Amino acid sequence: MTEDVHLANVGAASERFFRLYRMHCVSPSRDTLFSLLEAAHSLNDRLKVGAAADFFDVQEFAALKCLRNYFHHQQELRHVVRLIPIGGYPIKTDLMTLCLVPRDNVVAAIETTKRYQEETRQACQQMFHWYGPVVNINPALFNFVVAAFEHLRNRGVPLAGEAVEQFEASYGYEEENDFPHVVDGRLSTSAGSIDELLTDIMNATRF
């Protein structure tokens, strides 16, 4: 198989990844989240074959892959994850949606990681945002998509499709206006403890 065909395969996987990311942004659900995590895992495999590269130097990917493997092999995602618009809560942040996972599940995901467990632990600790018994993974997900786009572009992967074009336009707008491509994602509240507030939200939200 020629190099051009290999890169075309990576391009097709990239188009699917960005299409699923757009779907997750427009109408986030547990299904769109799991599909996006699966697409990231698949894209990494394609990238290794087609461009002799991978995302393992991106800590967000290592952290998300840990959760993907856990949800894929150990725990049904829909029983533990909450995707919550922040509009109805006294929370300040730079993303409009929370993606909350119980701390115990993230710890379990780390503990069931067989290879590079300590590196995975560090990635999860640094890239996920931990609030008492609750972990917000949405900033890591958002920032990984940025890193993935930059990796793919730098490797000469042909990127096409409406979702990619929309992402490129947003990325270009940020560059032209000196806006950061990544988010901080930290949460604050005027209603007491953010840890307690997120715990209450987690407990009050139905599956």
Image (cartoon, rainbow, N blue to C red):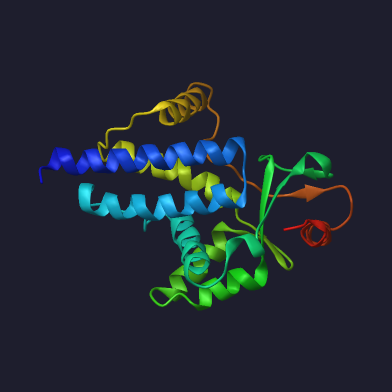
> Can residue 80 be seen by looking at this rendering?
no
Counting the numbered discs, the total is: 0
Residue 204 coordinates in the image, percent (x, y): 83, 58
> Can residue 126 be seen by looking at this rendering?
yes
Q: Residue furthest left?
A: 2
Image quadrant in which the C terminus is located: bottom right
Answer with left or right where residue 85 lies relative to residue 109: right
In terms of depth relative to the viewer, which is nearer, 191 or 11?
11
75 over 46 or under it: above or below: below
Answer with left or right where residue 28 lies relative to residue 119: right
Q: Residue at x 89, y 55 (%)?
A: 192
In terms of depth relative to the viewer, which is nearer, 93 or 111?
111
Q: Residue at x 83, y 57 (%)?
A: 197
Answer with left or right where residue 19 lies relative to residue 205: left
In terms of depth relative to the viewer, which is nearer, 41 or 155?
41
Residue 51 coordinates in the image, percent (x, y): 22, 47
Q: Residue at x 34, y 53 (%)?
A: 44
134 over 55 or under it: above or below: below
